[in-house]
Amino acid sequence: MLRTGSFAKGFHGMNGTVQGLKKRISVAKSESPADLVLKKGRVVNVFTGDMQERDVAISDGVIAGLGPDYHGKKEIDAEGKWIVPGLIDGHLHIESSMLVPSRLAAALMVNGTTAIVSDPHEIANVLGIEGICFMLEDSRSIPFDIFFMAPSCVPATCLETAGANLSASDLLELKNEPLILGLAEMMNFPGVLMGDEQVLEKIASFKDRTVDGHCPSLSGRNLQAYITAGIRSDHETTVISEGLEKVENGMMLMIREGTSARNLEELLPLVNNNNSRRFCFVSDDLHAEDIRQRGHLNFVLKKAVNLGLDPVTAIQMVTLNPAEYFGLKDRGAIAPGYRADLAVFKDLKDFEIFSVYKDGRMVVDKGELIGFPLNKTAIPPGQPKPLNIGPMTQDSFRIPHADGKARVIELIPGQIKTRMSYEKVKSEDGWVVPDIKSDILKLCVVERHMASGNIGLGLVRGFGLKHGAIASSVAHDSHNLIVVGVSDRAIFTAVEIVRDMGGGLAAVQDDGKVIAQVPLGIAGLMSWQPLNTLVKQLKTIKNAASDLGCTLEEPFMALSFLALPVIPELKLTDMGLVDVNRFEIVPLFLES
Amino acid sequence: MLRTGSFAKGFHGMNGTVQGLKKRISVAKSESPADLVLKKGRVVNVFTGDMQERDVAISDGVIAGLGPDYHGKKEIDAEGKWIVPGLIDGHLHIESSMLVPSRLAAALMVNGTTAIVSDPHEIANVLGIEGICFMLEDSRSIPFDIFFMAPSCVPATCLETAGANLSASDLLELKNEPLILGLAEMMNFPGVLMGDEQVLEKIASFKDRTVDGHCPSLSGRNLQAYITAGIRSDHETTVISEGLEKVENGMMLMIREGTSARNLEELLPLVNNNNSRRFCFVSDDLHAEDIRQRGHLNFVLKKAVNLGLDPVTAIQMVTLNPAEYFGLKDRGAIAPGYRADLAVFKDLKDFEIFSVYKDGRMVVDKGELIGFPLNKTAIPPGQPKPLNIGPMTQDSFRIPHADGKARVIELIPGQIKTRMSYEKVKSEDGWVVPDIKSDILKLCVVERHMASGNIGLGLVRGFGLKHGAIASSVAHDSHNLIVVGVSDRAIFTAVEIVRDMGGGLAAVQDDGKVIAQVPLGIAGLMSWQPLNTLVKQLKTIKNAASDLGCTLEEPFMALSFLALPVIPELKLTDMGLVDVNRFEIVPLFLES
């Protein structure tokens, strides 16, 4: 059963009551003063493509009327500014930012975003329904709309230990929550194509809702099969021809421009006057540093317009289009009866934010957040809890040496794919030891959900560490604890530190001294801190990794994908090394 | 309480079950044969505007896959034909056709229509919820989708006696019916603008659904007020500037091209590449003869394309656009997972129908209906019942003469508006008598819902009758019995005839001889007959009216609007003469 209450925020205006309507009608007729009027801004009309100077009169958070000469208890001059519907990101994993929902909301809001649709896939893999309830709970009572899709693929695979297993009937319970709009990206496209009944049951349960897709490179008959199941979007497209085929067959194409995957430039030529209603811009994964540096959808708008897209078409792709796709009837446009969610830009070229309004209240003024309840996020008593790791010692991380070559995971710079290489490895007293010169280091994945004691042991090339170890509790998709290091002592200590923080990132010297740590106390995935604090912490720990000799710019991001057994070629889970192409556990050493 | 069962037809494919999905996926992959494949037709893609030759593979009534070389248990050659999504009429009053829903469905289907959204406003004014339940019931088990909007304005006014009164709570009960999509056209725009709480309560009850509008000539602050209430469409627009203002403010503009109102030519220049998604074509009122002569939306497509509209844009306006507006997720496009509702045209210029498929079954072949359950509509025992009219005699229709001029209703050719003129009228023995030379005839409205005995008496100019009387139980919006005639005997007999048929049309000579009659046994509005029989009956009775001297081409249509007290200037209800501009009952004779 769900452990969260029902929500005040639904699809519709807060004042959909008779008295609310009555007041709003009176404001629209100029018989009563509006609560607020934005005066003389150039209102971007997503229905017609026009931009006209109009006053926007607001009553109880909803747009009452548009036109000349509205008056209100409060009036704000918007002359020379461009008023755009609050931006909507149709696909975003909150956890990737390492910020809790309310903190992420604050961070996105200054960029003009007023609503996101998120898939709590990561926390669901750790804490199941309870984790989703935390996300729902933390999304409440803030001036920002966070909608959710029910995670469709928990656990992601059977080759790792996850913290939860969400069946179709679990998901059906979620369906009753007003903030849950549909079924999240169906990553298990092989399951769909094979007609896996458990997978299809999830889709069937959401047949009257929006069902999001995830189908990189799928085409031809397989794409037909995937879409015919009722899946209506994709955000994994990277190539023009792929995008065209998906749009032709009825998918809403979500062009992704996030931190690790950026497909805008490649896919933008697909968008034209005839088909633009079938496109959105989304982020998928967005890191804290990136939000701080680039912004959010405002950055995507700027980039798209710079690349030649018509500004209103671009704006439609982050307002009306996602609103229509998700059935958010009172969002995505500036018109009477729509929520007064507004992003006010200085221009439609650089898309620099001037102010933002949510439900008619100013929340960003001259680019600065105001009146956002930042004190909301207090750590509840008894939190965080240490990770649930089985008994271990330093010796738990020893790897017996064998004859023959070992399978080594090779990082590929800038990609989440890895290569599998076969190497002779160094040993001492019958145990494998790291080979700093050849950059072959120990990689370990420690099960942290049920204290099973599972530890996957492997070798990785590409981090460049000369000393110590770095560890993280962010490791897709099951988020077991992953650690790479030069000495068992450092590895062991790093694991202990992350465990005791209740999850997070750690950098440890060979002598066991902790030189940096970032607590991620919520499921080992998210911090209680606001954006700026977190970004500073992340910078510190990345510098620490660099001090240990690490040559990667984003060592923790690289680490987080090494346990993901659905991306080729060689990965490591708590169950052992996974040959992804064969989709099975393989021994470290080749049988000689 | 609703007296109808729940419905098998919902928003989604019949095979949204796991086994249905499994089978469809297998067909999409060409691992199983489709039930049916339409081979090599040019498929119109409403997402991209393209038209490509593709096979359409169908499984259990749903499109499984599109592409080359699909094979099925049955294959039909469509080479050289144009395959279009089944046409959808977003606003149509079934009762205007005088056909019951299932008969109308058959009549529309041969024109490529597979779904309509109707407002059962007329029958609701006569029979209330029971009437709506009849409509729902008769819409079941036919290969055609009839959706309904809950009638928002029953009764239409307080200046007439209606058969029912539907409150917000009555409408809320309807909301649970899967075939009810939202709230029907809010004709009471003065009520909205005045903030009438009963009116707003109806809108508030449907705030999470589609709420249709009806606001002829509304603009400026009043339009803002009407839209801010949550009303999202209009089909009463007649002028370009009016349409532009409505679209700019977020309304779905339903361009009406029906029997009595035809706005296509005037409004089409409004549609362009930037805004076309905000337009539909609808019929509103469509008479049986018109369906037989012109067709339905196929005629509108032909006309729009002839006027220069891009064919695919035109097609979107009767497929994808209404489907999106009403949230019909699996209709309005040809794509995997969508219902196999298909209209196959010989070309995209004349839009001549070749065949029609509903849920993957052929229902029209070479323009002829096949396999449609025409024997469905049998008259239930005990039906029709005589109309519930109070005791009356021939003398009930006498009008006492008074000094001074009388208010006379003047027909305006081709319009439903009338003029009020002031005339000296003829009398005999203190009673008003018709003046055939001046064409001033008696018009009477007999209350027929509750046997109140109410009879409204007035005078009308414009019918040109030289003998007898014609009577009808179709009289907007309360559908009391209306009769125009030259002699009281003919008037009385015509009323008796219509009463005893349980409603219908009658033409009677001065000697009381009935020369033609059309039974409309369902609520006095609709016939049990199929299209062709009804059209013949209507032709006969119009000839009869002509034989009586009537100079109007559509005498019964003219009659049907004379009791509508919301259209200026002078109308007649069972309560008496209505001065519409003053919105009050006035005496026949001016106080001298």
Image: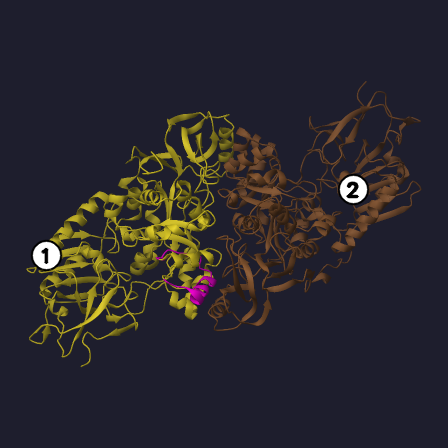
Chain colours: A brown, B yellow
Is A43 on the left-hand or right-hand side of B417?
right
Residue A562 placement: quadrant: top right
Is A335 on the left-hand or right-hand side of B240?
right
**Residues in magenta, as a range:** B217-238
Residue B184 placement: quadrant: bottom left
Q: Please give the name of the residue rendered at 28% of the width and 49% of the height, measured from the top-left corner.
A: B100
Q: Secondary structure at mark 1?
A: loop
In-front residue for pair A409/A455: A409
Q: Are marks 2 and 1 on the same chain?
A: no
Query: Is residue B1 visible to the viewer in this orientation of the structure?
Result: no
Chain letter of the residue beneath label 1 in the structure image:
B
Residue A3 placement: quadrant: bottom right
Chain letter of the residue beneath label 2 in the structure image:
A
Is residue A186 one of those drawn in magenta? Answer: no
Is A520 placed above or below B164 here? above
Q: Given the image, on which type of amino acid does mark 2 rest?
A: Phe
Is B124 on the left-hand or right-hand side of B530?
right
Rounded to the nearest whole Å, what is the CA distance between mark 2 and mark 1? 93 Å
Quadrant for the C terminus of chain B in the image: bottom left
In-front residue for pair A53/B492: A53
Asked if the residue under mark 1 is in contact with the one under mark 2, i.e. CB atoms within 8 Å, the reply is no
How busy is the neighbourhood of tag 1: few (under 14 within 10 Å), some, or many (20 plus)? many
Q: x, y percentage for residue A189?
A: 60, 34
Residue that mark 2 sits on: A556
Query: Is residue B554 visible to the viewer in this orientation of the structure?
Result: yes
Q: Given the image, on which type of amino acid does mark 1 rest?
A: Leu
Residue B548 badge: 1
Q: x, y percentage for residue B225?
A: 45, 66
Q: x, y percentage for residue B39?
A: 41, 27
In-front residue for pair B169/A47: A47
